[in-house]
Structures are given as C-alpha cells and as structure tokens.
Image: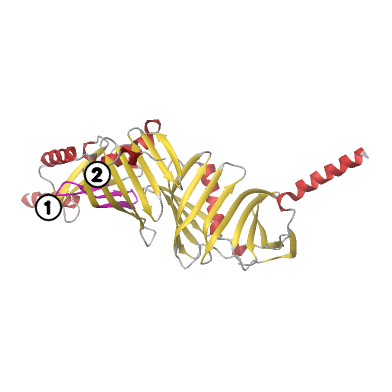
Amino acid sequence: MKKIFAIVLFFISAFSFAQAPSGYKPVKDTSAFKQKMEAQSKLITSLESDFTQEKYLSVMSEKIISKGHFHFKKVNMLRWEYNEPYKYLIAINKDKMFIKDNGKVSKYDINSNKMFKSINEMMVNTVQGNLLNSKDYKAKFFENDKFYLLELTPLQKGAKDFLKVIQLYINKVDYAVDKVKMIEPSDDYTSIDFTNRKTNQPIADEKFIIK
Amino acid sequence: MKNLLLSSFIAILFSACHFGHYGRLKEINECYYLATNLKPLFGDNFNSFLFKTNITVYGKDYSGLLVTKQMSPKDYRVIFTTELGMKLFDFEFKDTAFTLHYCVPQFNKPKLLKVIQKDIETLLMNDLDKKTFLKFNDSKMFYSIHKTKIGKLEYYYFTENTTEHLVKIEHAKKRRKKTTFTLSNYQNDFPGNILIQHHDIKLKIELNLLKK
C-alpha cells in the first residue's frame, strides 16, 4: 500500500514539476506578486522602448526578424512602429486606431471592430503587464532568480484557435516586461524582446496622432 | 453605302472582339514546343523568400508578411502572417496537390481561397515542365510570349527579349484577360515587386520582396 502511495506521489510531483518550464519553479505567494505588479504598473505614466520581434515558423529554417520602437502613454495611447526590414506603424489613441502602411494612413474606430478592440486590449495590457487581471486568460506564475514568468492561457474559443499560451517574462528588478512570447497551437511562435527602456519620460500627445 | 458602312463597322467590332486583348500578338512558331527558358522563379536551391504583402479584397485590406519556402523540388510552403506575427494562412503546394494547413476565418471562404491558391500556383510554376506552349512575339518585338492552356484558362507568359526576365503573366478566358501578374524591379534575376491584379473580381495582391 505504501509502495502504491509512493508511486502515486512520485507521479503527482513529477507531473507538477513538468508543469513548470525548465529552469523555473512555481511562485508560492501569487497574491503578493500580483500586488507588487499592480503597484509598479500604477507608477508608470509613460514608457518607451526598442523591440526585436522574432517569428518562428517550424517549416522555415530562419526566423523572421523585425525591429522597431514603441511609445506608450497613460491612458491608452500606444505607438508601435516597425523600422526594419519594413516600415509599418500602428497607433492607438484612446478609441481611435491608426495604421500607416506604404505611406498610406488608415483610421479606425476601435469600438467598431471586435478584432481591433482585442488587438488594442492585448497590446496595451501586454505593455503594461496587465494581462494577469484579464478574465479572458487563466494565469500561472513561475520564477527563477532573474525573472517571473507568467503563462496566460486564453479561455475564449476565438482566441484559443490561434493562441495556445502567452508567456510574459518580467524582470525581478523593476517588474517590467522584458519579453513576450505568443505560442500558437502548432507551436510556431512570435517573441518580442524589449531593450533600452525609458520610463516616465515626457512624450508629446502628437506622437499618437498619425497623419 | 450606308449598309456597307454599317456592316464594315460591325465587322471591325466583331473582329476586335474576336482578337480581344491579344489581337496584336504575332505567332512565330506554329508547332507546339516545350518552353525551356521559363524557369520556376521560386525554385532557387530551397531558399525562402520574404515579401511585405498587401491583399486587397472587395475594399478590405490585409497587410502582412508572406514567406515561401521550397521544401523539395516541387513542394512549396507559403505562409502569410500579419506584421505583428499572427498567422493568417499556411498553404502547401506539392506537385499539383494543394494542402490547407491553416487559415483564419477571414480567408476561409472557398471561392477566395481557390482564387488565392490559383494565383500562388501561377507564380510557383510547378507543372510548367509538363506543358506545351505556342510562341508569339509582340508587334514591337519587345517580348517573347508563351501561351499554354490549363483547364479553361489560357496562360500567357511575357518574357523581355533583352533581359530574358519574365515580366508579365496573364490569365485569359476566350482571349479576354482575367488576371494580370506584373513582375518588376528585377535584382539578381528575381523580381523585387509582384503585382497580381484581377480584372473580373475586386482582388489585388502586392508582393514586395524584403529578403531572399
């Protein structure tokens, strides 16, 4: 009997161990972590950073790498701009969304389109590290000595079709998001690394109006 | 006299209709033959190609990145993602077989998928070596034109005589053009820009090469 119990225990522990990505262990006090995250994000009024986006497609031998810069300002203003190897810009200004592509600017009302609304929520919340409060995702918390790793699994059917899990790597120094990885059901993924971050520097509102 | 004028006018009108868009082409070889100078553009040592891409369909604009990858001599994978990385479709073309690996609902419409599939197939030129062609010249001798028939469609391939670059492909039905593929800005024997313009439906696909 004891043997069976030991085997069951082994499998349970092995299973729970397998749940944590390698090099990470589950966060014990998740509510303390959440509180700290929220307190930190409240301190942020503006944010800007370079980013490098990698698209991994299993059939391709190389990743598709694009680079750019983003600006964020509270409340709900975001400028997300690709500079290499192409020019493409998305800006969100409260309930308006602008896309500049091939020199042509298109303007959209975010509330008029479900897809734009979810793009907006996802981008703004990702930048702010706010996705952990969303009811649309189930959150799991892991950590190693440098990062907290937040794994968010989408709960809504539409999102589940193209997204298996979002991983947010949050550094333990200032609770900022250093890396986002969006993994598709096929295990292809998009990862975005943030570098040269500047917090609470003045950013003119004009940055978020595209002409 | 009036009748003569009218009948000549009708005759001209009819002959214009009959020759349609391709009336000016001069057939230079009546025998069917295998076109050896039409080489598949994307068949380049299993390399991949990356394009900044815009697909405009009935007023809706989808922009993103299109990647092609030759997996084996006649097997290509073609994937379209948004700039932000979201996959929109994932196609495979193996010989003449087509596999839909993935597709978002916006593209998952049988007619639209079929049209995009045909357009990409045209560019991949997978079954070109099995076809026989008629060869023409245009009146100014700028181009060599190869014509073949696939299903109900006539395919015209326009090759520039000076550079031997494939600069235009046209799909036509009863000699009326349905789709024009314009290939321009050649660098290292590969077009920097490909524009696919449909004439009978509101669909335009623009491919701008980012990386080879």
> Pointer 1: residues within 10 angstroms few (<14), some, or many (20+)?
few
Q: Which residue position holds label 1?
A: A10
Secondary structure under badge 2?
strand
Q: Which residue position holds label 2?
A: A47
| Horizontal side of residue A81 vs B145, given as left or right | left
Q: Quadrant of residue B106?
A: top left
Q: What amino acid is labelled 1 in the image?
A: Phe
Decide if residue B107 is in sight here: no
| Horizontal side of residue A111 vs B191, given as left or right | left
Is A160 in the magenta?
no
Letter of the chain that mark 1 sits on in the rendering = A
Which residue is found at the position 5% from the left and 50% from the top? A2
Where residue B79 appears, as percent x and y from the top left, is 43, 53
Which residue is found at the position 33% from the left and 38% from the top? A120
Q: What amino acid is labelled 2 in the image?
A: Leu
Front-lying residue, B129 or B163: B163
Please give the range of residues in magenta: A166-195
Give the distance between the C-alpha atoms of the residues marked 2 and 1, in whole angstroms: 46 Å
| Horizontal side of residue A201 vs A210, given as left or right | left
Which residue is found at the position 24% from the left and 44% from the top? A47
Letter of the chain that mark 2 sits on in the rendering = A
Tag 1 or tag 2, which sits nearer the N-term?
Answer: 1
Decide if residue B154 is in sight here: yes
Where residue B87 appears, as percent x and y from the top left, is 39, 48
Which residue is found at the position 9% from the left and 49% from the top? A5
Residue farthest right in this picture: B1
